[in-house]
Image: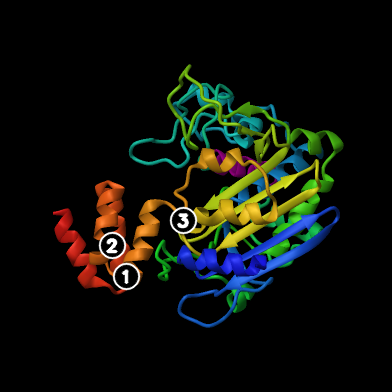
Amino acid sequence: MPVEADFQRLIEEAAIPGVAAAVVRGDRLEQILCCGLRSANAPELVDENTVFDAASLTKPVFAHAVLQLADQGWLSLDTPLVHYVPGYFPRDDRAHTITAKHVLAHSAGLPNWRNSDFPLKTYFEPGEQFSYSGEGYLYLQKAIEKITGEKAHALVDELVFRPLGMTRSSLIWDIRFDLNRAYPHDAFGRPALGGKPGEANAAWSLQTTAVDFARFLLAVLNGERLTPGSAERWLEPHIDVRHPGIQCLVPSNEGVATGVAWGLGWGLEPDQGTFFHWGDNGPFTAFTIGSLRTRTALVIFNDGASGLSIMPEMVAYLMPGHRPSFAWLDYARHDAPVRRLLRAALKRGIVQVWPQVQDAGLESDALRWIIQGLSAAGREPDAVWLRERLG
């Protein structure tokens, strides 16, 4: 069965309208795979020029620009960022030791995003452990903008997009994208709220295509626009990930072996010799992985919130191998009981599937998710029936 047919089956099972993937091997773009629709409400197909929200795949692109600036002498990766942006953490002396290297390796001690439970401050000594942080990238963006006097979107365009021929990529929205863009969808394939970023955010605002991102991956494999030392260092482990999940703000002496480490902008699977990153802003999901050893890399973009449930299988078709990154991220798979049972209920009715649901011993949250899925598909009588059983 061709890979395209397998991809089509997967996105249908996961209620994702469309997918675009690109594979590079050696020194060339070898394969482009596009399946499905740009929107659940329109017949336009995804193609190689369809622009997706890349979510956190923004981070390694921004890191590439930062490393170029460091190579050019604009900043030192080991100089505290407070030197460039004083007053960002006015009452946190520990934060005054955060460097660009800490941010790029997600060891700055900051939350992923500030909220009422985790206000913006350091939660451990910078450099002490890993905890994924978009806030760190935003802080580094402010520093870079202060140092260079340029906005991040213009700087990344100058240092990354234009030199690499990424003509349909930007950290802010470009009206050209309106003609061929992917639209956001929720976990059940319904149109969802999306945005067109008017300001750059170094953690998430990249808009790009699979082909453009493949050009970036070729540059990563070739060490383009970086000194040999920087090209080597950004793909070396700078800190081990010793806990499940992306965020860990409580220092702990108890470590687990995840098989994952972090370089300067990239996640790493050291034993496999691979670099990776994932993207998840809700209604858009993405994954990229590459190997210097085999000179192979790929990127996959989905326009649905359930995209990471099928990503391990998609990646396995194109780049087989053991992937500690997926085990560490721990997204529910498309063949998990709750998802299989929802698909069965949509096909046969919840009454017929109810004995299997009982046998699966699902938690109440999983049952509520099935109820949501039934309602999303217009199966309100089935949703009501199951809601009554839940009490």
Q: Say what amino acid the circle numbered 1 marks.
A: Arg
Q: Say what amino acid the circle numbered 3 marks.
A: His
- Location of the N terminus by quadrant is bottom right
Q: Where does label 2 land, which residue?
A: 353
- CA gap, disc 2 and disc 3: 18 Å
Q: Where does label 3 land, which residue?
A: 334
Residue 380 locus on image (x, y percent): 23, 71
Camera-nearest label, 2 or 3: 2
For mark 2, give the secondary structure: helix
Residue range (magenta): 136-148
Q: Where does label 1 land, which residue?
A: 348
Q: Determine contact: label 2, label 1, CB under 8 Å.
A: yes
Local crowd at mark 2 within 10 Å, few (<14), some, or many (≥20)?
Answer: some
Q: Is residue 385 left or right of residue 17?
A: left
The answer to whether any part of residue 165 appears in the image is no
- Compare marks 1 and 3 and give the one earlier in the sequence: 3
Q: Say what amino acid the circle numbered 2 marks.
A: Val
